[in-house]
Image: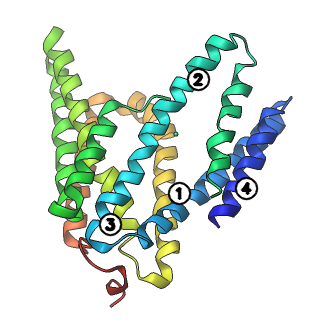
Amino acid sequence: MFIAEMIIFVAFLALLILCNDFLSLAICLFGLGLALGCDYPTAHMIISENIPSANRGKLVLGAFGFQALGAHAGTGVGCVVLILVPDLSAWRWMYATALIPALAAKGAALINVLLIVGILFAVVLADRAGRIRLQIIGFIGCAVGLFLATLSDDATGSTRIALIFAGFMLFNFMTNIGPNAQTYLLAGEVFPTEVRGMGAGFAAAFAKIGAVATAFLFPILLASIGTAALLWGLIVTSVLGAVVPWMYRIETTGLNLDQIGR
């Protein structure tokens, strides 16, 4: 599956570079998304199932963190391409550069710096503090960060800016040390072997559905209920995000994956 999806990715990427109309461009981008969607759980399974239990959390999250480095590298490549090809055709060359690492994989646009920092903390702590504990701490930290942001409604000037900045920086950091990283890690561990691929894929699919729904619904909610109400809604969902894993917790830290089914 891993090799097949990389072949599909390379094929659609090569065709994308040659596109001359909107329909063909949309088809090729759909194909790329399909291949990447397949790769997300498959690559995760390959990593999880080939790593010793004692170090699995650290090494799986280390691999997960490389998407942040890839995003930084991609942005750098894009800047270089724009300097060398300062016209509308630059987009073709930007996509073309992705062929090299994609082809090498047969054998991620600037990501926030705190993504890397949060992932590094998650890598260090996952096998020590435990997945569920970091998940709960992360969600609570998200709620605190969002609460700081809501306080900015009653503030002015530099205080307002500081509260917004501190709130969302804390939210971003705690998201990546908790929900972002630990949900990714747990999805590859918590299911019995015979349904692990399906379970991880199901979890990944719902993450993407949530991301798309957020992109479409947040502007509508922001316009209809206002910033404060929207932030309080997010605080409530973050608190629920801490409560639910605690109620239904299955701690996988240090467990052999074959034990999960039993």
Disc 2 and disc 4 in contact, CB within 8 angstroms? no
Residue 78: mark in rendering? 2
Determine the CA span between mark 2 and mark 1: 23 Å
Checking the image for residue 5, the label placed there is none
The disc at residue 56 is: 3
Alpha carbon of mark 4 to alpha carbon of mark 3: how far?
28 Å
Task: For mark 4, give the secondary structure.
Answer: helix
Q: x, y percentage for residue 168?
A: 25, 31
Q: Is residue 197 left or right of residue 68?
A: right
Q: What residue is at 67 percent from the left and 59 percent from the top?
A: 5
Categorize mark 4 by other alpha carbons within 10 Å: few (<14), some (14-19), many (20+). Answer: some
Label whose residue precedes the other's in the sequence (2 or 4): 4
Instruction: Specify which label sits upstream in the sequence, 1 or 4.
Output: 4
Outermost residue toward the right in this view: 20
Kind of residue at disc 2: Gly
Dot 2 or dot 1: first in sequence order is: 1
Q: Amino acid at mark 1?
A: Tyr
Nearest the eye: 203 or 213: 203
Confirm or deny contact between disc 1 and disc 3 (CB under 8 A).
no
